Amino acid sequence: MAKRLFAVVMVVYLIIDFFLTPYGGLETRTLTNATTTALATVGLLFVGLALIIASLVSLAVGPRRSSVLAIVGALLYFPVFLADYTGQFSASPAPSAIASLEIVQALVAIVIILLALQSRRETARGMA
């Protein structure tokens, strides 16, 4: 049951991540307004996205490895969130839909971290 919840939360994270991109249709800012900080943090965001996908794939094989990948992947969301929240992401402000979705994404990332830590504890107990 815990693995299923963990997987569902990671899928929700991936869906929200898609909507935060220009392909999701909510982001109206252009790349020309993006700062250097934005480009660096978006790079971290994509690395985190790849780690979340790897975590989801490895969930069936190695829950301990999956939880580590999920924790690191979720943590890599926060630089872009903080850059956008503090106005260092772009010269133009974030659209209200993006700003709201970023807060939801931050909460989902926190849930992923908490579930991954719980999964690690359960796996460690099972090994002892």
Image (cartoon, grey):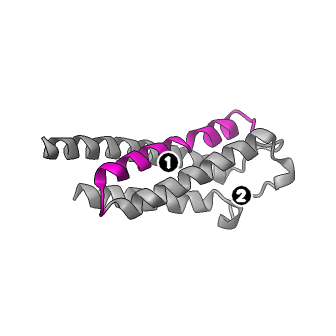
Please tell me which residue is depicted at 52% across the width and 49% down the height of the picture. 105
Please tell me which residue is depicted at 51% across the width and 43% down the height of the picture. 106
Instruction: Answer whether residue 116 is magenta in the image.
Output: no
- Residue at the disc numbered 1: 73
Task: From the image, give the main secondary structure of the stretch colored magenta.
Answer: helix
- Residue at the disc numbered 2: 27
Q: What amino acid does circle 2 point to? A: Glu
Image quarter where the C terminus lies is top left
Looking at the rendered structure, the secondary structure element under dot 2 is: loop
Vertical position of residue 61 compared to residue 106: above or below:
below
Residue 29, x across and y down, in percent:
79, 54
Please tell me which residue is depicted at 30% across the width and 62% down the height of the picture. 61
Looking at the rendered structure, the secondary structure element under dot 1 is: helix
* Residue 49, numbered circle: none
Mark 1 Cα within 10 Å, few/some/many (few <14, many 20+)?
Answer: many
Residue 60, x across and y down, in percent:
30, 63
Closer-to-camera residue (67/107): 67
Residues drawn in magenta: 60-88
Where residue 92 sits, quadrant-wise, is: top right
Closer-to-camera residue (69/6): 69
Closer-to-camera residue (114/126): 126
Closer-to-camera residue (11/58): 58
Residue 54, x across and y down, in percent:
45, 59
Q: Is 34 left, or right, of 66 in this rendering?
A: right
